[in-house]
Amino acid sequence: MTRHFKTPPVIEAPPAVTGLAVLIVAAHAFRVFSPLAWQSFMVSAGSLQPDRFWAWAGLGAPEAVPYSSPVGALLPLLTDALLHDGWGATILNAALVVIFGRLVHASLSIGRRSAIVPFLAVFAASVVGGSALHLVGQYPAGSALIGASGGASGLFAAWVLIQEGRGGRILSSRFLTVFLFFAAVNAVLWLLGPSILGARISWLAHLGGFLAGAAAFQGFRVTRRLS
């Protein structure tokens, strides 16, 4: 008797999760294999630059060159997630999206026809939340921000809430304990990053992404209960 075996997918995750992880890797590949002029343009347009943002808002240093439009100033709060400084960070963030995103997507699928929009909204809110806290910490000028780690941190926070079951709350003792531990680890990595990683991470972007992701995920869970 002939048996037919189905080849398992390379990534065991829903299409939305897989697609997001692939987009992160593809965006980095596109940039690094582009001409140098294109690379410079993508970094300039897509990275979040606090000095230019605060100058655009009328609060920056006089010598800073402000963003030329609201779109140019606000879009990097999201597009910075598609830029990375190396393959290591790119693959790590893509892997974290898959690891935590699978369960987050599955949880958001309960009671809905599709979880694509809620899932992507949680990730986007995490990225923007991380970017916003980085801006506050880098006022009125500071290092530019790139990377999807804020989004990955938000998915991790949603995963923590899922572990508590349907009654999981942002202000629960377990969630706050995880948050404090997460903050402590990131603070250490921020201090030791130059010597260990060769670069300083934006720990505020991680914390902002964690909190924003938790809030967005909890909001979708409340909406689902009310519907």
Image: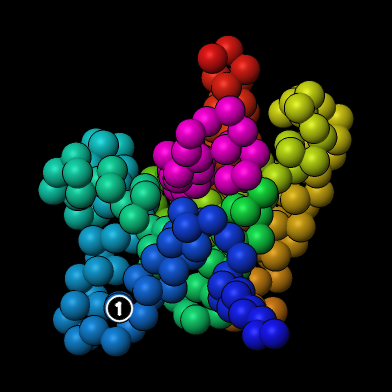
Q: Which residue occupies 29% across, 69% down?
A: 43
In terms of image quadrants, where is residue 19? bottom left
Q: Is residue 36 magenta?
A: no
Q: Is residue 119 magenta?
A: yes
Tell me where residue 215 appears, x and y as whole percent.
Answer: 59, 30
Tell me where residue 7 appears, x and y as whole percent.
Answer: 59, 78
Whether residue 147 can be seen here? no
* Relative depth, front residue between 43 and 10: 10
Whether residue 220 can be seen here? yes
Q: Which residue occupies 30% across, 78% down?
A: 30
Residue on which disc 1 sits: 30
Tell me where residue 105 appears, x and y as whole percent.
Answer: 58, 45
Quadrant where the N terminus is found in the figure: bottom right
Quadrant where the C terminus is found in the figure: top right
Furthest-front residue in this view: 1
How many discs appear?
1
Q: Which portion, as a residue range, is magenta?
A: 104-131
